[in-house]
Image (cartoon, rainbow, N blue to C red):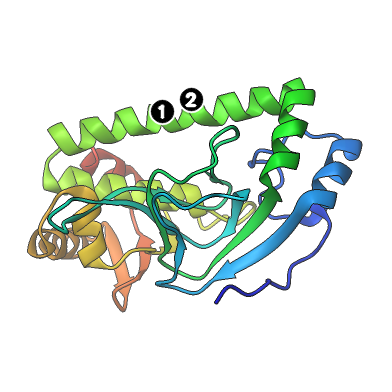
Amino acid sequence: MVALAERPSQCQSCPIRHRAVCASCDADELAMLESMKYYRTFEAGQPIVWRGDRLEFVASVVSGTATIEQIAEDGRRQTLGLLLPSDFLGRPGRDTALYDVSAVTEVTLCCFRRQQFEKLVKDTPHIAQRMLEMALDELDAARDWMFLLGRKTAREKIATFLLLVERRTRTPGLNLGLDLAQFELPLTRDAMASYLGLTLETVSRQISSLKKEGLISLVGNRQVTIEDMSAIKAAAGED
């Protein structure tokens, strides 16, 4: 089952400190968060929450990738979104989960006891403001994804996905050059197909095409190097 992760206890040393919900917290507020937090680590493939579960916590993703999914009555599964480092799981004021959330890679969550966190949000306006900003960012991302699924070509979808992962998993201070970037794909090609509304064959064909053209290189199936960032942006249909 779930194991407690070995992680630094101090918020100041947290790798997502300046991107997560606690980004605007002062020293006293961080101390309050320290008093209500605990870590949980989930293995790849392990469910984090099921739809309808009662949530006793809310959480920030410290490391790893999880999928947000919904299952139709006939058993079809659709990936609706990804949770990447600094993303927030759960909603203050809502005590049940609306979707299934599963770990794709090993995932570590910084969990806050829900009732205590809700009180802190109520009493601390700038934390509530940060929650609003994150919710609006999530709404904008959902709208962008609607455009991607509805209007972009298969090649544009794959290139956009690569850029999304690179931007969200980038290591601060790591400089490989203006047009170089390295990262590990958090999803299998089959999961990418579900997420992007493509077939497995199309995903493999488009990745092979980008590799053949020299835009990316691969080590195995998951380690990606973007060799030409400008060209990948063009392939994604970005300005």
Type of residue at label 1? Leu
| 172 with respect to 204 (left or right) | right
Where residue 152 appears, x then y in whole percent? Answer: 15, 37
The crowd level at tag 1 (other Cα within 10 Å; few <14, some 14-19, many 20+) is few
Q: Residue at x 79, y 50 (%)?
A: 36
Where residue 141 appears, x then y in whole percent? Answer: 38, 33
Quarter of the image for residue 26 reads top right
Q: Residue at x 24, y 41 (%)?
A: 236
Q: Residue at x 40, y 43 (%)?
A: 98
| 120 with respect to 21 (left or right) | right
The numbered mark at residue 217 is none
Q: Secondary structure at mark 2?
A: helix
Quadrant of the drawing holding the N terminus: bottom right
Quarter of the image for residue 91 reads top right
Asked if residue 61 is positioned above or below residue 47 in the image, the reply reads above
Q: Secondary structure at mark 1?
A: helix
Residue at which label 2 appears: 136
| 188 with respect to 94 (left or right) | left
Q: Is residue 233 visible?
A: yes
Q: Residue at x 24, y 32 (%)?
A: 146
Where residue 221 appears, x then y in whole percent? Answer: 29, 74
Q: How many tags in the picture?
A: 2
Type of residue at label 2? Leu
| 227 with respect to 23 (left or right) | left
Where residue 215 appears, x then y in whole percent? Answer: 26, 56
Residue at which label 1 appears: 139
Mark 1–mark 2 Cα distance, whole angstroms, equals 5 Å
The answer to whether the residues at label 1 and label 2 have Cβ atoms under 8 Å apart is: yes
Q: Is residue 24 visible?
A: no
Quadrant of the drawing holding the C terminus: top left
